[in-house]
Amino acid sequence: MSYLKLSVCTLLFTVLFISCKQHEEARRPVSQASGTFMKKSADRNKKLVASEEDVIKKIIKNNPKVKYYATRKGYWLYYDEKNTADIQTPKKGDIAYFNLEIKDINGKIIYSEAELGPQTYYVDKQDIMMGLRDGIKLMHKNETVTFLFPSHIAYGYHGDNNKIGTNQPLMCTVTLRNFVPDPAAAPANTPKNPTGTASKPVNETKKDTLTP
């Protein structure tokens, strides 16, 4: 009888041991599969970027009369209207006032300038399209520039949940009308005159920043 009990216990222990080992081995491929998935995803992204860049380079090649400039951020631009008189460009904290038109990479309008209306952007302090975030800082006042953005620095995989689709490269034309320092960022302390007394603020007429 004791032999029978011992056999049953041994059998149960063996079944339990085998079951646990199979469960452990079954879980191992999960991390391996995860690593494989990440690698495949990275490879797909590289191919997508290369494919979009090839399309943009063909556009540039087919327009030899237009002077295109490649940027370090991986997009291209050309000047519709260039301002060589000014040297200042928007910096972090400035308020930029601009007009914008968005087209697909073949030049078909997605959002017209009239549809989007005048744009106001607090430089590097607002969440806007990555390409525009960088491109506006390259512009001078009263310039019009057309940017060619691959999708990864436009709206990426998700699009804009409206007219711009998944992984869609874009052509954006920007007219920078004006940019000014953010008044809220001005020093709080009132400057003093040489006598040590506080200077009276000068009453100035507030300029309409929407008009260059």
Image (cartoon, helix red, strand yellow):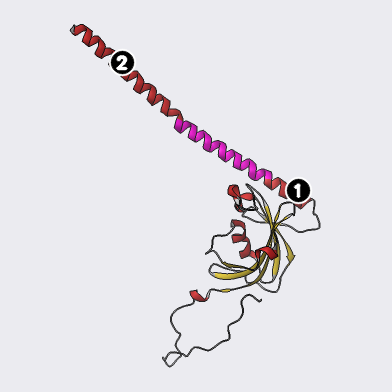
Residue 29 is covered by the magenta coloring: no
Label 1: how many residues lie within 10 Å, few (<14), some (14-19) or many (20+)? few
- Which residue is painted at 62% across and 57% down in the image? 131
Q: Earlier in the sequence, mark 2 or mark 1?
A: 2
Considering the numbered disc 1 on the image, is that residue within a helix, a strand or a loop? Answer: helix
Residue that mark 2 sits on: 14
Can you name the residue that lies furthest to the left here?
2
Image location of residue 203, percent across then percent down: 53, 89
Q: Is residue 202 above or below residue 65?
A: below
Amino acid type, mark 1:
Lys
Is 80 left, or right, of 120 in this rendering?
Answer: right
Q: Quadrant of residue 70?
A: bottom right
Can you name the residue that lies furthest to the right here?
65
- Which residue is painted at 45% across and 33% down in the image? 31
Label drawn at residue 58: 1
Label 2: how many residues lie within 10 Å, few (<14), some (14-19) or many (20+)? few
Question: Where are the magenta residues, as a range?
Answer: 30-51
Q: Quadrant of residue 23?
A: top left
Image location of residue 51, percent across then percent down: 68, 43
